[in-house]
Image (spheres, helix red, strand yellow):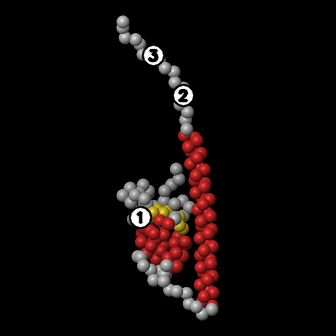
């Protein structure tokens, strides 16, 4: 009795699931964009109401409480974008609300430095987010990541 030749087993061709995965990924990206838009709308309403309240308190003689920042501005900005990615104007408003004086210019310069040092990155929609792995940020020196 000799060695039998190997049997040829016919297998059905594998189904390529990549198009389905890409489609699901696109759907999730759209959901994320919709949620961010809704969050930005709510945050702008909150900022508007806070501004209106400050005007009304000044008008009626009750001066708004002056806040003193408890964190250095870079740490404050990191904490703010950890909550959710934000655009520069939202970060400026948050810094002013937290008691940072002349927040506009300081936030702008601090954000530039933090992007250049790769602690933060700027997304395509203009929102800043923290770089997850500071040792391997995988982004170009400009601070933005091109679409894939």
Residue at numbered disc 1: 119
Gap in angstroms between the C-alphas marked 3 and 2: 18 Å
Question: Does residue 24 show up?
Answer: yes
Query: Which label is found at residue 78?
Result: none
Residue at numbered disc 3: 7
Check disc 2 and report its element: helix, strand or loop. Answer: loop
Q: Earlier in the sequence, mark 2 or mark 1?
A: 2
Residue at (51% x, 54% y) in the render: 146
Q: Position of residue 61 (x, y in %)?
A: 60, 93
Seen as rendered, the residue at the extreme top is 1
Check disc 1 and report its element: helix, strand or loop. Answer: loop
Residue at (58% x, 46% y) in the render: 24
Q: Is residue 80 left or right of residue 62?
A: left
Work out whether residue 54 or residue 138 is closer to the camera in this orientation and state it: 54
Question: Does residue 105 show up?
Answer: no
Q: In the rendered image, which quarter contains the N terminus?
A: top left
Check disc 3 and report its element: helix, strand or loop. Answer: loop
Residue at numbered disc 2: 13
Q: Position of residue 78 (x, y in %)?
A: 44, 68
């Amino acid at each position: 009795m000799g060695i039998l030749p190997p049997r040829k087993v016919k297998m059905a061709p594998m189904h390529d699931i990549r198009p389905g995965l890409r489609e699901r990924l696109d759907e999730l990206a759209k959901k994320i964009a919709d949620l961010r838009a809704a969050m930005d709308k709510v945050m702008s309403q909150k900022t508007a109401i806070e501004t209106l309240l400050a005007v009304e308190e000044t008008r009626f003689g009750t001066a708004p409480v002056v806040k003193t920042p408890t964190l250095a501005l870079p740490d404050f900005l990191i904490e703010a974008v950890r909550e959710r990615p934000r655009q520069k104007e939202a970060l400026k408003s948050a810094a002013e609300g937290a008691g940072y004086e002349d927040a506009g210019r300081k936030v702008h310069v601090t954000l530039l430095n933090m992007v250049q040092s790769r602690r933060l990155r700027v997304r395509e929609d203009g929102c800043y987010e923290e770089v997850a792995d500071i040792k391997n940020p995988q982004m170009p020196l400009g601070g933005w990541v091109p679409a894939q």
